[in-house]
Image (tube, helix red, strand yellow):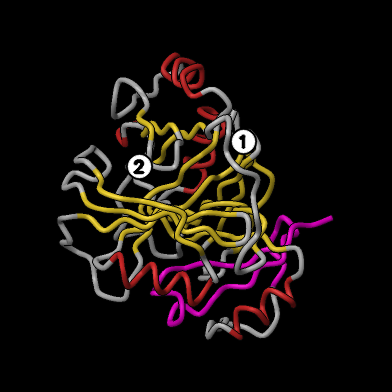
Amino acid sequence: MFEKIQHIGYLTPDLVATVDWFEKSFGAVNAGGGPLAQTAAIPSGGVNAYMRFGRVEAEIIEPQDKTGLTAGQLTMHHVGYVVEDINREMADLQGKGFKFAAPAPFTNVMGQQVLYFDTVTTNGVYVHLTQLPADAPSASAQGLEVDSIVHAGYRVKDLDKAITWYVDNFQGEHIGGGASRNGGRNAFVNFGRVQVELIEPADTSHMADDVHDMDHVGYVVGDMVSCMRGCQHRGLSFVADTPLTNPVRQQVLYFDTETTQGSRMHLTMLPD
């Protein structure tokens, strides 16, 4: 079972500058990192850092091959889901037809066991299982008052087909949806203890079949006003003065991407 989203992974052409941005903008702490070997997820290899703020984490990756990356821009790369027993989960998922990019998990610099899916079986997106170390320290909130990651959002060409994929493959539950912020439509699917938002844009003519494109991340806060002020104090801004309420009763407030390295993110307050 997927327990929570451990982190969102981002690509950057300049790790040092991006670490500095997370420290200044989110009050994040660099918890560790180092060289990355060549893998299916990072074919060129590179270097990374794990940035912690509030009670969440972001993995920042500077690949050796920076083709397509732009200075001052964050590119969403992957989602890491926490499971209790990674080997048991791997076996269960293989039994359902999923494939993985390696025969066994590897242990990263944070002591987390990590195993990427083969993107052939995950609609072209990078996703990995994560088993936290038994002696992982208790979360110690620092920086922005972020409690958790509610969901990753994906753009899809066929919303109904994407919903069915999550329901069938991850025993998901379609909990609602409606008009999306950009004129298309969306849906929210819960699976395990996590959630995904699926977005079908108004114009899908440029999109590939059966490929889900990473769109945004939703960060959960307990006090929208307090966190909003903290963000503004650090130089971040928002697309509106007040949050909107989405079809599943979450209060959502998007950052202005001009202040978030071009990456879409929103603050979220969950319904009682």
Residue 107: name its quadrant.
Answer: top left
Query: Pointer 1: residues within 10 angstroms few (<14), some, or many (20+)?
Result: some
Relative to 178, is 31 on the left or the right? left
Q: Nearer the viewer, mark 2 or mark 1?
A: 1
Q: What's the residue at 24%, 45% (across, down)?
A: 42
Callout 2, which amino acid? Asp
203 shown above or below 105 = below
Residue occupying the far right of the picture: 272
The residue segment tinted magenta is 244-272
Front residue of 212 and 192: 192
Where is residue 61 shown, x and y percent of the image?
A: 31, 55
* Residue underneath mark 2: 210
Q: What's the residue at 22%, 51% (across, down)?
A: 46
Q: How many marks?
A: 2
Where is residue 52 shown, x and y percent of the image?
A: 52, 58
* Residue underneath mark 1: 3
Q: What's the residue at 43%, 55% (across, down)?
A: 155
